Every structure is written in structure tokens, then in C-alpha cells.
Image: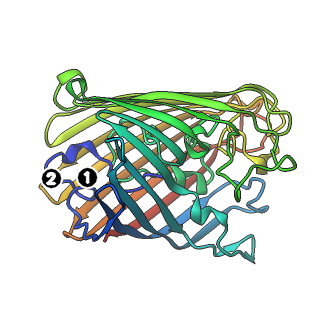
Amino acid sequence: MKNKLLITSALAAGSLMAGSIANAQTYLEKGNGYGQSTTTIGGDLAIIYSAIQNKQAVSGYGTNAKSTRGFGRESQVNFANRGKLNNGLDYAAGFSLEFDGRGYSNNTFATEDASISNENVYVDLIAGNTTFTVGVDHIQRGYAGAAPQIFNITELMRAAGSKVCYVLGAKTSESAGVGIIQKFPSAGISASAMYAPRSGDTGAEDVASLTSNGGANSSFEVGFNGVNTLGVQGLTTTFFYNSMARSAVTNAGTVKGVSYGVAYNFGTFAVGVDKFKNENGIGSSAAPSFFGESSIAASAVTKKLGLTYAVDSNLTVGYIKSITDTSGLTSVQSTETVNALQVGYNFGPVAVSATASKFNNLYSEATGPQDQANGRMGQVRVSTKF
């Protein structure tokens, strides 16, 4: 589950989207033989209008400069249950259903697929500040980084042709696996470790099949997120690392992903930086299949700066700059830059945000120093929780 709601740290008080949107939920009480458990049903909805222009042709985009516009959507329903075990430990379990819609792709109408049920599937056993978890797409991760932003536009940037690092390396935290989360409240740190026996696999039916292993090996991920880290009010930190041994089918070398960042909230103003490195990434921007590079050692590095300013309790403005070194993807020495301006407004139960982005030197298959593809992208996003 991509964390696509507002994540700006400039809104600690009166958060624009994440904290201020009304989150009405339905509670169902039932007996389980060991006491009462609580089932929570909730969800979120986002509708996004985007306009994209790419000024240089690349594979998959045709022979001429491309532009398009239209609506995207995300709707998700979350089911969660909490209670106590007969040994006194707490437990939590749940799953989410995400309906993103599948419209026209390459002039072919596509329907929803199995990814509907790959969201936030878990069973947690909880002992104080320690949580043992098994599931898919549930453990904490650091894809969004620490730098403040009104809305994480990374996935939408890739839709415009950007090679910015996104789902990093072995994709461990989006795979079926087991993990542990350890909270250190006095330090403001939540650390975690996860093991996935087959990276990129979200689970199929009741048992894994010998005929459908996909060539992926096992992987692990370790990392932490810090809020008011080490007692420093306003200090946000993050670090994550994952690794998978060479895959006989999809990758030529060891898969690795690393991200780390730091940000500080001064109250109404927040600033932060992140660095992401993707090496032979599974299904990621570092080894894109439509560029035909999944058979070579491919790597990309993205550095990101984020700034936000809370004008008042409802209005926030922001700026994002990313620099991606794509020289590890091709012999062309290319550095892509993206500059984005953002604004968001909270209407209570509904939040609206807008982003205007400019792309310079987008990665392409061109061979030579003239690799100077540019592009633009704008979005307006309406979101709510229920």
C-alpha cells in the first residue's frame, strides 16, 4: 500500500490531510472466547486529475512527443480486528481491498487484477513495544523518505517518464514475509526487520507452487523511522536497507535498495533531504522492463529536497526538487532534475492539493550527449477518509 496521503511534517498542528480529515469508522463488537475484540471498517478515496507532456519520444511512448490528460482514482477499504489472546498477548489482524481502476492501456481496456487483495494483509502478535508480524505490505517502510511534502508525487512522476527511484531494490516490504517491529518510545524510534522467502511474491492461493517461483530469491530488509528523534522535537529521520541475492531469471546481479533522510520542523516551516539508491530493482524504475534493461546491472540514485510552509491551519505550500543520476542505466551520462511546486487546502472531511512539476533531461534511449528530453506534469487531487 503506497502511502499517498499527505505526509508533510510542517503540519504537526492542524495537519492538512492526514490528521484533520474526519475518519468516521464502524465498530463491531464480537465475542471470541477470551474477551471482546473490536473490528474496525474504514477507508479512503482519492480522485486525481493529471496533465502530462513529454517532449522527446521514448520506447512505449510512440515516435512523436506525447501529451495526455485524464483522471485517476484510488479507493480502498480497510478491515482490522484487535483483541487479546488466551496467553494475555495482544493481537491485530486485517486486510485491505484497493480499487485503483484499470482504464485504457496502450489502446487496450484492462480490468482490475489480483493486486486488489495485496494491500496490508497481516496478523500481528503484540507484547508491549514489540510486534511480531506476518503478512504482505504491512510493515513500516521508508519509500516516501523524510523530506516534507504535501503529497508524495514519486509514482506520478514516473508516469511522466521520470526515472526517479521509487519502490527500492528487493521490494521486500511489499512481499509476503515475516517481521518484527520494535518501538523505542523514549527515543522516538520505531525499528524493524523483515524476511521475505520469495521477493516480489505477495502470496498465491494456499501454497507456493514449484512451477511459478519467478526466479526470485529470498530477501531481507532492516530500517527505522524516527519522529522527534532522540528527544529532539521536530527532528524526523529514516533509514532502510534491503538486499536479495542474484535472481536467475530477472536480474544480472545482487539486488539492493537503500534510503535515508532527515528533516526538521521549525513549526510553520519544515525542510528535509533524502537519498535513494536502487540497484537491479524488482519491478522498479532502476530496471524498467519497457527499456529492455532487466538483463543488465542497472542502478539509479535519487537525491530529494523538500520544503513546506504552513500559511495557516488549513493552507500549506511546498517545494520539491529531485536529482536522479541515471548513468547506471545506460552509457548515456544523464542527470534528471525535477522541480515541483505544491499547494494543499483542508476543507475538514475533504482535502484538495495541486502540484505543478517541470522535468529536465528525462532519461531516454538516445545515445549521445544530446539526451535532453523535457516534460511537464500537473495534478489536482481530491481526497477523503471514511
Instruction: Indicate whether 379 appears above or below 124.
Output: below
Question: Among all residues in the image, which is located at the extreme bottom?
Answer: 109
Q: Secondary structure at mark 2?
A: loop
Label 2 sits on residue: 311
Circles 1 and 2, Cβ within 8 Å, touching? The answer is yes
* Residue 34 shown left or right of residue 285 in the figure: left
Quadrant location of the C terminus in the rendered image: bottom left
What residue is drawn where x is 47% and y is 47%? Answer: 138
**Residue 350, position as x, y percentages in the image:** 26, 71
Calculate the distance from the C-alpha at mark 1 to the C-alpha at mark 2. 7 Å
> What amino acid is found at the position of numbered circle 2 in the picture?
Val
- Near mark 1 (Cα within 10 A), the count class, few <14, some 14-19 or many ≥20, is many
Observer-nearest of 143 and 336: 143
**Residue 187, position as x, y percentages in the image:** 24, 23
- Near mark 2 (Cα within 10 A), the count class, few <14, some 14-19 or many ≥20, is few
Observer-nearest of 380 and 39: 39
**Residue 339, position as x, y percentages in the image:** 44, 45
Q: Quadrant of residue 214?
A: top right
What residue is drawn where x is 46% and y is 42%? Answer: 139
**Residue 210, position as x, y percentages in the image:** 85, 46
Label 1 sits on residue: 317
